[in-house]
Image (cartoon, rainbow, N blue to C red):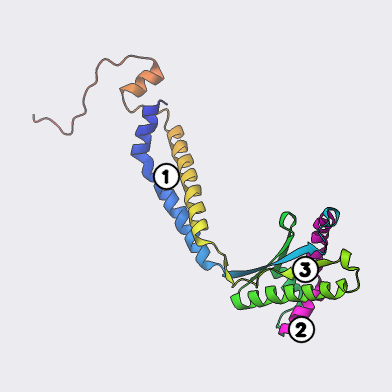
Amino acid sequence: MERRDYLNVLVKRGWIILLVAVIAASSAFAFSKLQTVTYRSSIWLNVWPGRPDWGLQQTIKGLLRNYSGQIRSRSVAQQVINLRQLDMKVDDVLAEMTVSPIESDFLIQIDVDDVDPARAQIIAQTTAEVFVEQIRVYMLEQDKSDRVDVNIRDDATEGRVFWPNTKLLVLAGGLVGLIVGALVLLGLEALSADIIRNGRDLERHAGLVVVGSIPATSGRRGG
C-alpha cells in the first residue's frame, strides 16, 4: 500500500482505533475504581561513620544491606506491634514493609503500604525509632572511632495514595487501546486486500490499465 492508501484507510476507518482506545481507557478506569486503595508512608535513616574515614565509609555501604535486613526482622516487627498495640500479626507487618538501602547517599528508605494512611505512618515511624534505638545501644559497646551513627532524617511522611494510580492506568489503557486498534485496522485491511473496489485496485491486482469506467446508476429508466 502506498502512503496515500494508508491515509485513506485512516480517514475511513480511523474511528476503529479511537473506539478501541476509548474502551481500553474506560476499562482501566473502571478497574482502578474496583481496587482497594493502598496508602504509602516513607521514612529515611541516615547511616554515617563516627569518623571521616574512606575505608569505614566503604564498609558502611555493605553494612547498609545488613541493616536493611535487620529492619525487616520479625523481632523489630513484633516490637512495633507491642509498642503501638496494633491488631496485626508479624507477617502482616512485614508484608507491608519494603526496606531499600541507598548506598550512594548512605541512606536506608523504609516504605510501608497499608489501607489505613495513619497506620502506615505509625508503622514506618515506629520501625525507624525501634531500629535506631537498637543500633544506639549496640554502639555504646563499640570504640568511638568505630561507631556508626544511625538517625532519622525526617519523620515519616503522611500516608499518600500509592495504589491504584488511576491516571497512569487510564493512560496506559489508552495507549494499549491505540496499538490494539491499529492492529485490528491492519488486520481488516489485510483481509480485504484482494477485494477490488475501484480502478486503481484493478490495475494493481490484474496489471491492466483502466481507461474508463461505467458509472453506477441508482434506478431504472422509464420504459
How many other residues sit within 10 Å of disc 3, few (<14), some (14-19) or many (≥20)?
Answer: many
Q: Quadrant of the C terminus?
A: top left
Residue 110 sits in quarter: bottom right
Dominant secondary structure (helix, strand or loop) of the stretch shown in magenta: helix
Q: Nearer the viewer, mark 1 or mark 3?
A: 3
Residue type marked 3: Val
Q: Callout 2, which amino acid?
A: Asn
Q: Residue 16, how many percent across, how many down?
A: 40, 45
Query: Residue 109: x percent and y percent?
Result: 70, 64
Q: Disc 2 and disc 3: Cα gap in Å?
A: 23 Å
Horizontal side of residue 27 vs 135, given as left or right: left
- Give the number of marks: 3
Give the residue drawn at x 40%, y 20%.
Answer: 205
State whether residue 60 appears in this view. yes
Could you tell which of marks 1 and 2 lies nearer the N-terminus?
1
Q: Which mark identifies residue 73?
A: none
The image's mark for residue 17 is 1
Left or right of 40, for residue 172: left
Specify the segment rendered in magenta. 57-84
> Residue at image x 48%, y 53%?
171
Q: CA–CA distance between discs 1 and 3?
A: 55 Å
Point out the residue furthest to the bottom here.
85
Mark 2 highlights which residue? 82
Name the residue carrying label 3. 150
